[in-house]
Image (spheres, helix red, strand yellow):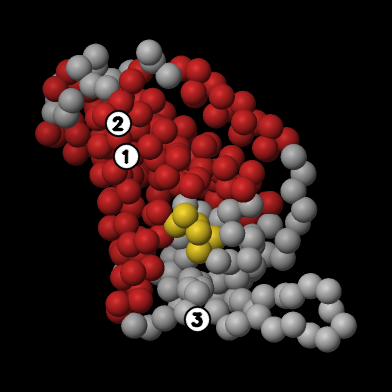
Amino acid sequence: MKPYFLLMALLFATSVTLAQDPTPTPTPDPTTVTDVTDKDRPTSTVHPGLLTVKPSTDYARPNAATRRKRFVSASVGPVGLGKMVATAGISTWTNSPQEGGTKWEGFARRVASNFGKNAIKQTTKFGLDEALKFDSHFYRSRSKGVGARVRNALISPVTARDRNGKRVVGIPNLAGTYTSSIIAYETWYPDRYDWKDGVRSGTISLGFNAAFNLFKEFIWKK
């Protein structure tokens, strides 16, 4: 059965999340907020007379305005749109899927398909980030070692940070990536495709994300 109900449930859940008024938190300087690994994080200490322990970390969860700005940028920003167009161009050149053809009409359909998939992905990821108080944004590593920087780029697509900056399983990005691919392959893709093709496509997408993170880690410093 085509999972239209899944898309509606995700959009509803996100709309509820967006309606909430999250508590503002300090906005970190984007030029200084970098990756914080468990190895780099100093051990928390308990001070006499205090009931709580404040962890020592360089991470500060971005405030609501910054999080919304990142969501909009990932959805309709120049980098996101550029990736959609470039991917559509490659798919048109290779004529994948073949039903799309190699004409401008096929290219336009593929751009629309990529836009739809990205909209589902970003909406799901943002909604879960807000609900779980996670941060799925990619931060470059503060380490100067090549190995640590490569590791940071490769594991970022499948991890996130909790409110204290600790790395956790990246449920928002994983759910957004696989949900968008499965819905696309089960709905507007040709009938010969099914959810298994969506899972395969989602896995490939995570690999491309890791490769793009390497590019941002070592080359593109913006």
Q: Is residue 85 visible?
A: no
- Residue occupied by mark 1: 202
> Looking at the image, which residue sits at the far right?
49
Q: Residue at x 67, y 37 (%)?
A: 17
At mark 3, the secondary structure is loop
Amino acid type at circle 1 is: Gly
Q: Is residue 91 visible?
A: yes
Asked whether the residues under the numbered discs 1 and 2 touch, taking CB atoms below 8 Å apart as contact, a structural biologist would say yes
The residue that label 3 is drawn on is: 40
Q: CA distance from mark 3 to mark 2?
A: 37 Å
State the residue in front, 82 or 163: 163
**Which amino acid type is shown beneath numbered disc 3?**
Asp
Label ID, residue 198: 2
Label 2 element class:
helix
Secondary structure under the numbered disc 1 in the rendered image: helix
Between 108 and 51, the one nearer to me in the picture? 51
Question: Is 75 located above or below residue 65 in the figure?
Answer: above
Q: Position of residue 149 (x, y in %)?
A: 35, 73
Residue 5 coordinates in the image, percent (x, y):
50, 18
Left or right of residue 1: residue 4: right
Instruction: Measure the C-alpha gap from mark 3 to mark 1.
Output: 31 Å
Residue 29 position by quadrant:
bottom right
Taking depth in this image into account, of 63 and 83 the one nearest to the observer is: 63
> Seen in the image, is 137 located left or right of residue 48?
left
